[in-house]
Amino acid sequence: MFKHMMLRLLCGLAVLACMSVQAMGQTKKIPNGLHIPQGNQRHFNVTLRDGTGKQWQFQRYLNVYSGLNYVYSGGLYCQVSGSNVRSSNNMVWMNNAGDEIEIGPYTRNNCQIYRRAKVYRDRGLTRWMDIFVNTTSSKQVVPVRIYTSLRRGVSRVITSSGASTFGKKDWAFITEHQGVSLLHVVCRKGGKVRPTVSAAGSTINVNYSITVPPKGVAVLCYFEAQASSTSELQKTLSKFNASHLLSDLPSAVRMLIVNFRSGGGIEDITLDRSGTADVVIRKNGDVISGKITNKEFVIEPFFGELTLPADKVIGFVAVSGQESTVHAVVEGGQVITGKLKNAVITLTIPTGGELKIPFTHIKECSYRISKAKSDDVLNSGSLIVLRTGDRLAFDPSDLKCTFRTRHGPIKLLGKDLRGISLDHQNRGVHRALFVNGSMLAGILEPEKIVLPLKLGPELNVSRNMILAIYFAEKEEDDSAKTHVILNNEDELFGRLVDKAFEVITDFGTISVKPENVTEISFSVQDPGQATIKMWDGSTLRGKLRTKTLRFAVKPGPELDLHVGHIVEIVRPDALPPDKTVKLVEKYIAMLSAANYKDRQEAQEELIHMGPTIAPLLLEHVKDPDLEVRQRIRNILDKLGVKAPG
């Protein structure tokens, strides 16, 4: 059995490829192919048949009803915060091939939501894509439920790991329904964006939490199949290959799919691999299986000759029109493009004998899928991605560069970064993405990048040859950090460094401490004019005396932000003034007093002070004293604030 493997540089490169789309924030910049062409409109209901003859009958929610032996009462609704996404006019767009339809937009949770459904004509499978377009300058966390109601109850669940309940290692599950079985593929194997699943009685709920970047796009994808037997669906599951099933979509669209991240670089490199043998595929289409016995391969990329040990190589794909030039797919997500020296594959075949096949006759060749060479080629470290298609590993400490921003030049450190996009489509501006979610525009310098590679030679290239630089994937929670939105759609997470700043109001000049502020909104027409919301809900209006605010990206550099560049500053953890803080600390200490009356009085006083003191109380929810913990939680409950855990 062969598996169609698309080289996947998961999550990191996908994020980088999306950065330019998200930063632009304009609908016209959304990648081609995100929506089907809107030239062929139909009325609901719409019925399509898959490759096994099964009917998929769609209603205005792009849900399915009826199905095999009337199993569905209403299947695969997309619910966002309890509301079903639906067509507003009972119409649907259909593609020219007649196998895919789309509805939308439907507005919910500050997002425009579209639904696509494709019924495959070459197999018994249907694909849904739910598209979320964030119309705001803040990221949106969207709760999504894929809800199915059934006429035939769930009698049995079998997950992709063989369990009876969907767990951390599962990516799909089969449900049985009195003579009908359904397959549900809900995420990529090993993927980070995973749902919770409940399947019992007459309902199936698949629950996701989707983060949609500011002015950005996120796509949720899942697959469904119907059959009269579970064994038939288990065969479908064993042959399931997301890369192949998503190959009709442009690379820029595939990279937006949060639960099936795939693709990367400027093109997709595919290998047809076997789980039982090494494979050579000739240019005439012949497939020869056996064991590749080459000990090493010598390749000549533009940056110098390399010797690749065979145990590091996944496979080779010929570059069309260039004799003996290949894309070499190497462990760790690397790709090296160049001419093979002594380009002959030595293949021992099972029936005996040895073939020596010149690469001029080969379309592609690959090693068998094994634990050492899995069917997913994952990027396991930092990679520099070139416009030639090369993806090369390096030590991030070796990258010496400056990022010239409108706030001044800064040094970029690999430990602080998820990646840098040098996509020229973004008006010639590069963008750095930090581990805490901050995004910053600038120009990478110097013009020549010199970088030692883990493969051995030194890379010396113009920055114009670089598509992206990806650092080992890491991410930090930004929810408790000060959030700054700039007028070029950059976003920063961290803290304001200034101890205080002066505001000139109509009634006098006052000093404001950032720690006491919840939000600052700046005027577009009058730079520096601001509306300031304080910790207790009061509002101040005036002009900042300072021209810049010092801001520290955490972790990352410090920047001097011109107030004319700032749209908004949001602080989720605003604190009361020092006097109030000391009073709160006094009452919290009294919660463990020996006298019951003192403890009760302290609790009542804290409740009386109101919800603005919640950030101070939350610091004590894990107090070692049991009664203090219980009283803190009681106070938070009275104030309408949910305590963690």
Image (cartoon, grey):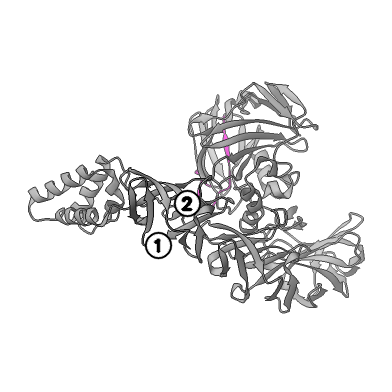
Q: Is residue 385 above or below residue 159?
A: below
> Dominant secondary structure of the magenta stretch?
loop
Answer with left or right where residue 521 lies relative to residue 459. Answer: left
Q: Secondary structure at mark 2?
A: loop
Front tag of 1 and 2: 2
**Front residue (pair 343, 338):** 338
Q: Is residue 568 above or below residue 385?
A: above
**Front residue (pair 209, 28):** 28
Tell me residue 408's x, y (percent): 57, 66
Answer with left or right where residue 429 lies relative to residue 203. Answer: right
Q: Amino acid at mark 2?
A: Gly
Answer with left or right where residue 582 lies relative to residue 381. Answer: left
Answer with left or right where residue 605 lies relative to residue 321. Answer: left
Q: Amino acid at mark 1?
A: Asp
Q: Is residue 19 above or below residue 410?
A: above
Tell me residue 248's x, y (percent): 76, 44
Q: Which residues are magenta?
A: 163-177
**Residue 498 numbered mark, or none:** 1
Q: Answer whether residue 138 is magenta in the image.
A: no
**Residue 528 numbered mark, or none:** 2
Q: Answer whether residue 168 is magenta in the image.
A: yes
Tell me residue 453's x, y (percent): 69, 75
Q: CA separation, marks 1 and 2?
A: 16 Å
